[in-house]
Amino acid sequence: MVGTGAFLLMATACAGQDMPTGRPASGGDSAAPTGSVSTSPSPSPSPSESVLPAPPTANPPGKPRLTVPEGSSPVPADKIDATALPAGFPHEVWTANGGTILNIRAQEGGCGHALGEAAEQTGDRVVVNLSETKAQTGQMCTMDIRYPVLSVALAAPLDQRTVVLKTTPPK
């Protein structure tokens, strides 16, 4: 029970979401924190309602996730120009939503959060600027590196255009 709680806390912290706070959990305390989980039964769906989860959709632009959305197609390596990225920086790109969404593996660390924007869209290339938010002054941050997937909206499908990945200074 404690291991599951620690995993959930870590997963939501990495996703940048606030977790409800209640009283701190102690090693032998099996009670759930106040307000953290509802134990009341869910109403049963009517026969006309679907009990299947909604199909996955493209990740909204600007909202990082840990995995590549289902149904995304990898962009061929010869259509990715990552020469402007630092050594070791990921350069994986996928398309979704008919080629109008780019899902890009980025890099972030500590208290920073990865950002991506289509800075230029021409007939033969799309330039994506990747950056990271700065930590607040005086804020304690971990020294970890994460590789979230960012979604960037395009004005038109990627088709045969080259994706040029660049980094910009932290914002």
Image (cartoon, rainbow, N blue to C red):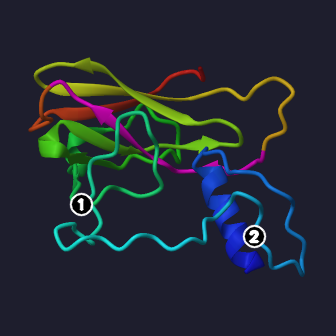
* Image-based side of 132 in relation to 94, left or right: right
Position of residue 166 measured from the top left corner of the image (x, y, whole percent): 42, 28
Up-down relation of residue 30 to residue 45 (above or below): below
Mark sitting earlier along the chain (1/2)? 2
Is 152 magenta? The answer is: yes
Quarter location, residue 5: bottom right
Quadrant of the frame with the N terminus: bottom right
Quarter location, residue 35: bottom right
- Give the amino acid type for the residue marked by disc 1 in the picture: Pro
Q: What whole-number distance in Å separates the C-alpha atoms at marks 1 and 2? A: 31 Å
- The residue identified by callout 2 is 32
- Give the amino acid type for the residue marked by disc 2 in the picture: Ala
Position of residue 104 measured from the top left corner of the image (x, y, whole percent): 37, 44
Query: Helix or strand or loop: what does disc 1 sit on?
Result: loop
* Image-based side of 21 in relation to 124, left or right: right
Is 28 magenta? The answer is: no
Residue at 9% across / 38% down in the picture?
159
The magenta region covers 142-155
- The residue identified by callout 1 is 55
